[in-house]
Amino acid sequence: MLRCLTIKIKEVIDVNEQEIAQKILRLAYVFRQRSEPRGRKKLTMNPRDMMILHGIIHLNPEGMIKMSQIKDYFHVSPAAVSQGIRSFEQQGWVERVILDSDRRSVYIRITEKGRALMQQREQEFCEQIGAYFRYLGEADSLALVRILERTVDYCQNPANCGSKEM
């Protein structure tokens, strides 16, 4: 995959930008490889799962939400939502609920097990990000935030990140 991206990058940027892009791609690859937990049991909730459960809680912190709300929130297909929720059910993180008053809609409720695991993972994340920011120091942490904010701004423009050419 990196080779494919390298070829595409060469078509759109000059040599200096190519070198920078190559470094970014390599660092992203190394970061992903090294961010996997070592020496401890693999976590039961990966970052994607955490993001989805966080979204469900965000949509309705105390109650239930419809499957269609999850689909709309994440801009994914109904099949993708159903598959993810099925996996979450098997883990005991959520349960499906069909109300007598609305038998056509399927609602999702996060279980206590799901909430407890989310809280644990959020705590671990906060500890990790805190350690990372202490390692970077204040100036580099603020620079990272500034760059990430600019990246988000750039990607919110459909002309920049929404093109099918990439």
Image (cartoon, rainbow, N blue to C red):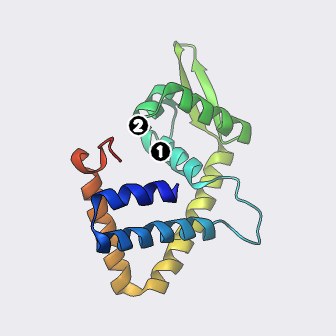
- Residue at horizontal 30 percent and vertical 49 percent from the top: 161
Residue occupying image coordinates x 46% and y 26%: 68
Q: Nearer the viewer, residue 76 or 95?
A: 76
Asked whether 49 or 27 is in front, the reply is 27
Tell me: residue 126, above or below residue 107: below
CB under 8 Å between discs 2 and 1: yes
Mark 1: few, some, or many residues within 10 Å (few <14, many ≥20)? some
Q: Is residue 23 left or right of residue 45?
A: left
Measured in 3D between alpha carbons, the distance from the residue under mark 2 to the one under mark 1, in whole angstroms, is: 8 Å
Please, what is the three-letter code of the amino acid marked with disc 1?
Gly
Is residue 132 placed above or below 1 in the rendered structure?
Answer: below
Q: Secondary structure under badge 1?
A: helix
Question: What label sits on residue 118 in the rendered view?
Answer: none
Seen from the viewer's position, the closer of residues 161 and 118 is 161
Q: Nearer the viewer, residue 162 or 22?
A: 22
- Tell whether 98 sits left or right of 6: right
Residue 58 % position (x, y):
44, 45
Rendered residue at 25%/57% (across/down): 153
Q: Residue at x 77, y 63 (%)?
A: 41
Q: Few, some or many C-alpha atoms within 10 Å of disc 2 (few <14, some 14-19, many ≥20)?
A: few
Callout 2, which amino acid? Tyr
Determine which residue is flagged by label 2.
73
* Mark 2 or mark 1: whose residue is earlier in sequence: 1
According to the picture, the residue beneath numbered tag 1 turns out to be 55
